[in-house]
Image (tube, rainbow, N blue to C red):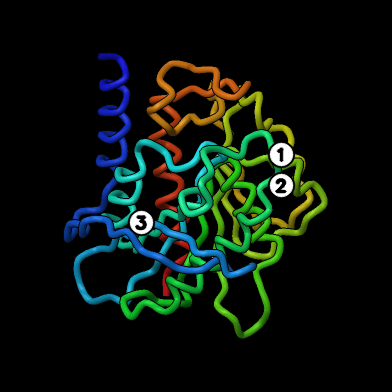
Amino acid sequence: MRGYADRWLGAAALAGLMIVGAPASADELVKFTSAGRGDPIQGYLTRPKGAGPFPAVALLHSCLGLPVNRRSIADALAGWGYVALFVDDFATRGLKETCAVDFNDAMADAYGALGYLSRLPFVDRTRIAAVGFSQGGDTALKIAASPGPAGAPAFRAAAAFYPPCANEADAQLDIPTLILVGAKDEVTPAADCAELTKRQAPGAVKLVVYPGAAHGFDNPEFGAGRRVMGMTLAYDPGAAPRSWAELRDFLKARLTR
């Protein structure tokens, strides 16, 4: 029963952060194309009740694919008043994971999701953020470092859960960015994120480091700790709700009209 209890606690932590308001609609399987070679991509769309236009969030998964608590995450965001699109990079490509290889289509897929969201009548195309997890966090940082050409749809903010900050060691992040990482993360060390943050303009990046937390600290699927693809992953019931409160406040501050 341990796994079920961990999942319930994770869902409860997210539910506790929901803003009181209209419930979210059921998530919908949607199709769009990658902005790179035009590959067909799918995703899961969840929206608040009402006509909008609403701000939106493109959610970018880790190298392990969509998380078990995908619906809880999307429902929480919709409860806060955001359209949530969880991008599924893998299904249409027949992939299970990309933890041991470079996944070069991630940026193009994220911008494909941005284009799709920008065309929805109930989305405010000027208020869209990218939120990524691990490999998806790497993509979120790359988006922050190259937010796109003038006049085209653009991400207004980026948030990265436990990203590999060393990959962007020399980057300048040009849109507001939130980085959330565990102090005991052996996969994507917090020290690398601290170095990246130091090199940015004052106030451009907010870094939050959670003492005692490991990689994947927000995902109840990992319970008290698991070894997956050579990585130590563990859910942290203290850090998880705090990180979602940080994300809620960040999005509220950065996606206001």
Tag 3, which secondary structure? strand
Q: Name the residue under label 2.
A: 197
Front tag of 3 and 2: 3
What residue is at 48 percent from the left and 16 percent from the top?
Answer: 225
Q: Where is residue 157 in the image (x, y as percent from the top left)?
A: 55, 62
Q: What residue type is labelled 1?
A: Ala
Q: Along the polypeptide, which appears first: circle 1 or circle 3?
A: 3
Q: Position of residue 121 (x, y in %)?
A: 33, 80
Q: What residue type is labelled 2?
A: Thr
Cα distance in 3D space between marks 3 and 2 = 32 Å
Q: Is residue 139 above or below residue 237?
A: below
Q: Along the polypeptide, which appears first: circle 3 or circle 2?
A: 3
What residue is at 50 percent from the left and 17 percent from the top?
Answer: 226
Tag 2, which secondary structure? helix
Quadrant where the C terminus lies? Answer: bottom left
What residue is at 56 percent from the left and 28 percent from the top?
Answer: 215
| Label 3 CA crowd tier, 10 Å (few <14, some 14–19, many 20+) | some
Q: Is there CB contact under 8 Å for labels 3 and 2?
A: no
Cα distance in 3D space between marks 2 and 1 = 5 Å
Q: Is there CB contact under 8 Å for labels 1 and 3?
A: no
Q: What residue type is labelled 3?
A: Tyr
Q: Name the residue under label 3.
A: 44
Q: Position of residue 35 (x, y in %)?
A: 59, 69
Quadrant where the N terminus lies? Answer: top left
Cα distance in 3D space between marks 1 and 3 = 33 Å
Question: Is 136 displayed left or right of 245 in the figure?
Answer: right
Which label belongs to residue 55?
none
